[in-house]
Image (spheres, helix red, strand yellow):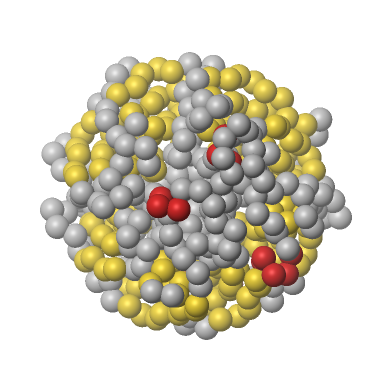
Amino acid sequence: MIVRAGLREALAMALFCGSTSLSADDWLGWRGSRHDDVSTESSGWNGERWLSEAPSWTIETGRGATAPIAAGDRVWTFGRTEHEEQILCLEARDGRVLWRQAYEAPERGRYATGDESFYDGPSATPSLDPATDSLLTLGIDGQLKAWSATSGDKRWEIDLYEKYAADQRPRVGRQGRRDYGYTGSPLILGDAAIVEVGSPDGNLMAFALNDGRRLWKSESTDPAGHSGGPVPITVEGRQAVAVLTLHGLIVVRAEGREAGATLATFPWETDFGNNIPTPTVIGNQVLITSKYNRNAMVKLRIDRSGATEVWRSDAASGVCSPIVRDGRIWIAEHRIHAVDLATGRTIFSGGRLGDAGSGILTADDKLIVWGGKGTLSLIDVSPDLVEFRELDRREFDAPSDTWPHVVLSNGRLLLRTREGTLHCYATIGSAE
């Protein structure tokens, strides 16, 4: 059963405290509550500044590439300390720890190979369902766990490697093998958690939120990709899910008797197994991109007949998932690139950024970018803009690439480094 949006929002209001701004937006999982990196909140830009000069608070949360998530007056983080993966629930106003859970876990997945210096600790951002008070975490070594978001009580757990026998990812392309462990966030869809397991028994599996029962598995048995996980898509009125596996895009039915059936596929293998950016869904269309041998972005149209390529562009991204607003695609890949959604033509590029990059489009036509080794930029993305315009820039001098995604929620900007330092800044005009 899929819970109606109105009921979900009402329950969320009952479970979590009030917001700090009039246009508040909870950030419930990877790429936000709508899985698109688009926020209903303002950046706070007033023509001169947009953030508090100093952070409201800073806390060490443990190593890893996960992003924080937030709802109302709470923030949840997932990282690694010593020999454990830990989940923290924080008071959003002051960073005070409300509860902590931890369990023993390795530094990397059991089949880890390649690029070990670039990652350690969990990579999959947690997912939150306020309607059922459910918090889902997926550790780097396949420990899928469900918790009470308010109390931290554990509800159920599954060791995906042990139960479903996923093997090491095979070598693809002309370069070396890569296996970064479990990187994809669970997708909460109705009463189910959909996870890219990457098993010979099914690439995707759906588990009941309340008890972890397996509800269905995908026909596709592709090995898991290295993206941020599955995303919802509606195809001709029917609920489906899209994910970029190691071999390409698959679109799978996610409801009824046909749940798990393959609806569409599109081949897309990247050297080093680096299918990393998450697919972006716009209606019945999907954007996928990667670098290396691909160095391209494609727009696909999905229907019952499969996937049709609409256009192919050389505007490629290695890490940042495409973000769409007002007919333009935005990616942060060494520079900021504006791409025409209709044609794939690059409108302009500008700025200076490192390899790692994530962004959020705000309600006041700004792009917040967190990338490189701790570079925070605020970019003007007005729909009629014809050249790059940076409004503000701050350097945080992080020790390594800032893989964790930037988060904007309830008047607070959350910035996390790979080493686990989490800063919370108040946007101008928020109540803090």
Is residue 190 or residue 359 the one in the foreground?
A: 359
At which x and y percent is residue 263? 78, 40
In this rendering, position of residue 278 left or right of residue 80: right
At which x and y percent is residue 345? 48, 16
Residue at x 23% of width, y 57% of height? 425
Q: Can residue 25 be seen in the rendering of this structure? A: no
In this rendering, position of residue 234 left or right of residue 61: right
Residue 10 sits above or below residue 25 on the image: below
Is residue 97 or residue 303 the one in the foreground?
A: 97
In this rendering, position of residue 27 left or right of residue 164: left
Q: Can residue 269 be seen in the rendering of this structure? A: yes
**Quadrant where the image shows the C terminus:** bottom left
Residue at x 32% of width, y 17% of height? 386
**From this viewpoint, which residue is outermost toward the right?**
257
Residue 409 sits above or below residue 138 on the image: above
**Quadrant where the image shows the N terminus:** bottom right
At which x and y percent is residue 192? 68, 63
